[in-house]
Image (spheres, rainbow, N blue to C red):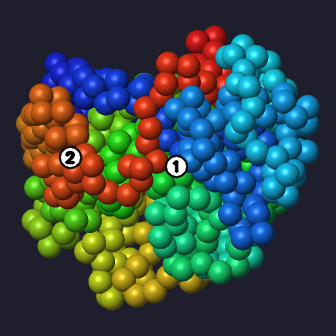
């Protein structure tokens, strides 16, 4: 890749990173003092707790709720489960079975020290962390053995039935897709628990469950072996169960998770304090697991004008990068989002799209950027939509994007058929092949339209980041700086699940992850 085709001002880039870092560190000072019920449920999952009761209530929810209601959750769930195991002299599996039978409790035992807690739980967390480590190693081996294209073609399946999703996902992979996402059932992000087991009924998508993850992973491995390619699996770790889904994804070798630091706040009205704490722990898990995160800046342009608000995408990318650094994510796992969403009726819109895409590419040169197709200005004219998607594919190739979500010509009509995905894949492949070396041949006119536009967007993003760093993130979100959507510090869903850690708080998983990050 040729760098600095846009002749960007390095001082403004450095300044933007400085402001984003200040913004993230200010929020991190809050995160470090707090935990959430979802973080604590994730600790239980990564110790090996699993299952539901007769009423389909997950065991993790029951345990955390019991401590929250009858003891002191500010100490963390780790010390309660360790103390209960020590006191009852049971294995974790036996204890969970007895807990479902209501014959044991998590509270009422003498609480152990931090060292004793680690000593009791070490066999359990070592088992799951080793499983995740092996998943990461296997992914890396398979990618090394198969190799991969410069740009990965990404499609979505969304039938609501995991068995049907498998059929459609395998068909897409055989047609040439490199990445398959199983979109979640509508509203799952607002559930404060994770549904359990295989599911065949969903609304606009399929429930994200650990069993569904396992089924799709197996299906994609099978078709990948046939095609001699590694097919990546994507799901969504946004919402009230962000770290729990990250843990499930790590256990079942998902490869990419939608994991934005602010998407849930802005687009799902989830409380900002809850989201910031949850995104931190979930990203630590992703960093350990080698899972690429995808951020959701593309969504800003579905509610705001893509020309007027382009700088908010860039500013948000810098902020997501800063939060990712706090969680130890390397740049190669930062799939920062952006999109091809300018109204095609705007004069020279294609040149503006090139400027925006090239800007993202040059600001984050090692990041596997996620580039999203046109959706807002797609209508029922499938011929125009196919043309727009071809232009989007050209910009992807010209600016060397990594994760390329394919546009569907029937976007505005119905959930894609297998044939729609096939045509989208062939469209992208034709552009990739026919323009393969175009990026190496193209330079942009000095002080021309593309360079000027990129400079303008970066300058405005820098000013916005400076304002947010002075105002503070919580106040800035309340003013609606992103997507023209205002959220209050105490509003939204999930604040009652946030609590301040006590001085003797213990999180054995986070402790182990920090040991790993310090050693690597």
Q: Residue furthest front?
A: 108
**Which of these two is toward me, 431 or 87?**
87
Mark 2 surroundings: few (<14), some (14-19) or many (≥20) residues within 10 A:
many
**Image point (80%, 18%), residue name:** 119
Q: Is residue 370 left or right of residue 477?
A: right
**Real-space Cα separation, disc 2 to disc 1, in angstroms:** 20 Å
Instruction: Give above or below for 368 relative to 18.
Output: below
Residue 242 circle label: 1
Locate the N terminus by quadrant. Answer: top left
Q: Is residue 50 left or right of residue 6?
A: right
- Find out whether the residues at labels 2 and 1 contact each other: C-beta distance under 8 Å: no
Instruction: Give above or below for 208 relative to 478.
Output: below
The answer, for residue 426, to whether it is visible in the render is no
Secondary structure, mark 1, is helix
Of label 2 and label 1, which has the lower sequence position? Answer: 1
**Image point (22%, 37%), residue name:** 473
Q: Position of residue 348 (x, y in %)?
A: 13, 61
Q: Position of residue 208 (x, y in %)?
A: 62, 62
**Image point (62%, 21%), residue name:** 511
Secondary structure, mark 2, is helix
**Image point (12%, 33%), residue name:** 471
Q: Quadrant of residue 202?
A: bottom right
Residue 105 circle label: none
The answer, for residue 241, to whether it is visible in the render is yes
**Which of these two is toward me, 69 or 293?**
69
**Which of these two is toward me, 25 or 124?**
124
Residue 477 circle label: 2
Q: Is residue 358 left or right of residue 32?
A: left
Q: Quadrant of residue 51?
A: bottom right
**Which of these two is toward me, 252 or 462?**
252
């Amino acid at each position: 890749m040729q760098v600095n085709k846009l002749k960007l001002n390095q001082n403004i880039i450095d300044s933007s990173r400085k402001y984003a870092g200040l913004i993230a560190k200010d929020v991190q000072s809050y995160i470090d003092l707090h935990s959430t019920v979802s973080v604590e449920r994730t600790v239980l999952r990564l110790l090996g707790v699993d299952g539901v009761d007769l009423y389909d209530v997950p065991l993790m929810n029951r345990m955390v709720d019991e401590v929250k209601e009858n003891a002191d959750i500010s100490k963390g769930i780790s010390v309660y489960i360790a103390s209960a195991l020590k006191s009852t002299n049971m294995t974790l599996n036996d204890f969970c079975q007895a807990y479902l039978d209501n014959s044991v409790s998590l509270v009422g035992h003498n609480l152990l020290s931090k060292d004793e807690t680690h000593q009791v739980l070490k066999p359990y967390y070592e088992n799951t962390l080793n499983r995740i480590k092996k998943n990461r190693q296997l992914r890396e081996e398979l990618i090394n053995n198969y190799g991969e294209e410069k740009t990965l073609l990404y499609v979505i399946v969304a039938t609501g039935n995991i068995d049907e999703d498998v059929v459609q996902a395998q068909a897409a992979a055989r047609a040439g897709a490199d990445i398959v996402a199983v979109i979640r059932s509508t509203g799952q992000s607002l559930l404060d628990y994770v549904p359990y087991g295989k599911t065949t009924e969903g609304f606009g998508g399929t429930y994200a469950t650990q069993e569904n993850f396992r089924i799709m992973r197996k299906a994609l491995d099978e078709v990948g072996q046939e095609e001699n390619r590694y097919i990546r699996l994507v799901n969504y770790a946004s919402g009230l169960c962000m770290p729990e889904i990250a843990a499930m994804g790590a256990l079942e070798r998902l490869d990419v998770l939608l994991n934005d630091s602010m998407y849930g706040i802005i687009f799902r009205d989830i409380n900002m304090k809850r989201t910031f704490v949850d995104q931190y722990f979930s990203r630590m898990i992703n960093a350990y697991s080698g899972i690429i995160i995808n951020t959701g800046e593309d969504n800003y342009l579905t509610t705001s004008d893509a020309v007027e608000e382009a700088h908010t995408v860039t500013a948000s990318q810098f902020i997501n990068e800063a939060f990712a650094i706090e969680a130890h994510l390397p740049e190669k796992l930062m799939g920062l989002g952006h999109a091809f969403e300018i109204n095609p009726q705007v004069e020279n819109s294609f040149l503006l799209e090139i400027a925006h895409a090239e800007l993202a590419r040059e600001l984050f040169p090692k990041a596997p950027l996620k580039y999203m197709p046109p959706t807002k200005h797609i209508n029922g004219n499938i011929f125009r939509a196919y043309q727009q998607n071809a232009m989007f594919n050209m910009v992807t190739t010209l600016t060397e994007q990594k994760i390329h979500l394919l546009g569907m010509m029937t976007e505005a009509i119905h959930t894609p058929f297998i044939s729609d995905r096939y045509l989208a894949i062939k469209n992208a492949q034709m552009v990739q092949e026919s323009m393969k070396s175009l990026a190496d041949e193209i330079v942009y006119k000095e002080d021309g339209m593309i360079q000027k536009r990129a400079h303008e967007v970066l300058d405005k993003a820098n000013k916005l980041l400076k304002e947010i760093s002075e105002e503070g993130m919580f106040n800035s979100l309340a003013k609606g700086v992103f997507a023209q959507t205002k959220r209050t510090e105490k509003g939204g869903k999930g604040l009652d699940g946030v609590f301040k850690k006590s001085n003797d708080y213990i999180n054995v998983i986070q402790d182990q992850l920090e040991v790993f990050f310090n050693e690597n």
